[in-house]
Image: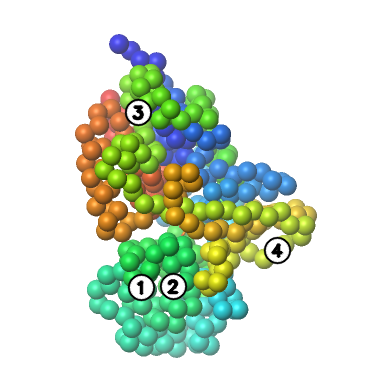
Amino acid sequence: MKKQYDYLIIGSGLFGSVFAHEATKAGKKCLVIDKREHIGGNIYCENIEGINVHKYGPHIFHTNDKAIWDYVNQFVDFNNFIYSPMSFSKGKLYNLPFNMNTFYQLWGTKTPQEAKAKIDEQITTYGTKNPQNLEEQALSLVGKDIYHNLIKEYTEKQWGRKATELPAFIIKRLPVRFTFDNNYFNDTYQGIPIGGYNKLIEGLLEGIEVITNTDYFSDRKKFNSIANKVVYSGKIDEYFDYKLGLLEYRSLRFENEVLDTENFQGNAGINYNDASYGFTRIIEHKHFEFGKQKKTIITKEYPCEWNPSNEAFYPINDDKNQTLFEEYHKLSLKEENVIFGGRLSEYKYYDMHQVIAMALTRSKKELNND
Ligand code: UDP
């Protein structure tokens, strides 16, 4: 019997929205549902005082892939914002990512040769050949001074676990450079959508039926019955009613303040390394779009453990959780007519461009097979 929709898409974040867009373009009928009151998943921005507030943490779009860059630019133009966060540690400010400016601030080294010699000496003393955890990885990448001033306390706050118990790959995200270059990312293309991220999602979902405030789990049977296939971008363990146990996630609590000042910190992001601050960073949202508003909005980010009443932000890809995820993944392969994808469904620390790439690959495979 022909069902009402070809695809029921659960979650209107980037994975769901890209999939819905591609399927609709291929002539399929889609319904997108989201349990939140708005679309866009974690890239959603709320406009307060004329400023786009990144409600679920700062998002800076960056990619090396021209096809992905062209893809998002179909829907919205991007500005020339370059993320250059600072880190506040023991009363001093340092540039990030780790580059010649940081080395100068730490050690007074003025040339790449001097900085390299200093780092090499530290790596030889404190590094290991085959790093097994984040601490060993950081010590092998940048040595003890950077690790203790700019990594350890931040990381342990962020993840709520000892750096020795965290996977090494997390820290590999951060570049180490021997140039005076404060660009946090190495990618060729970078920016913030002009007018905010909502424009990107609205562009992707244009002409597609979307229902917000609707939880798939409130009536799975009914939802499954209206579409031939389900595209699921929520938590994979929740899909299976947590039957093998709960996967752990890191959550965040955001404390927003509207300040009657034009410029609070002079930068979009300042990280706070010291454990004495409960938050990991302060984001000043207007700087993402070079805002000139009279007021400013800042957000302090407090990491905390996920529980069923807050939001799951970061998967914790340590051995224990990764093993459990693999079991859920095996179950997901047996689910007929369900496509799983996105950060929560794949339990992967994806960036936006990676989610889009994944959604394009999956949708292509699916729609060509059809
Ligand atoms: N990190 C750190 N010090 C910093 C910023 C990041 O030690 O000032 C580490 C930390 O472990 C973090 C990882 O690098 O989890 C990745 O940071 P990134 O900024 O990429 O995280 P995200 O923006 O996704 O929160």
Mark 3 secondary-structure assignment: strand
Name the residue rendered at 28%, 53% in the picture.
322
- How far apart marks 4 and 2 lie (CA) works out to 26 Å
321 lies left or right of 286: left
- The label shown at residue 264 is 4
Q: Quadrant of the N terminus?
A: top left
Q: From the Cβ of disc 4, is ligand 1 less than 8 Å away?
A: no
Which of the two residues, 351 or 154, is positioned nearer the viewer here?
A: 154
Tell me residue 368's x, y (percent).
29, 29
Amino acid at dot 1: Glu
The residue depicted at 47 percent of the width and 65 percent of the height is 157
The C terminus lies in quadrant: top left
Q: Nearer the viewer, mark 4 or mark 1?
A: 1
Q: Residues within 10 Å of mark 1 (few under 14, many from 20)?
A: many
Name the residue carrying label 1. 135
Labels 4 and 3: the sequence-earlier one: 3
Name the residue that disc number 2 marks.
Answer: 152
Q: Dot 4: what SS?
A: loop
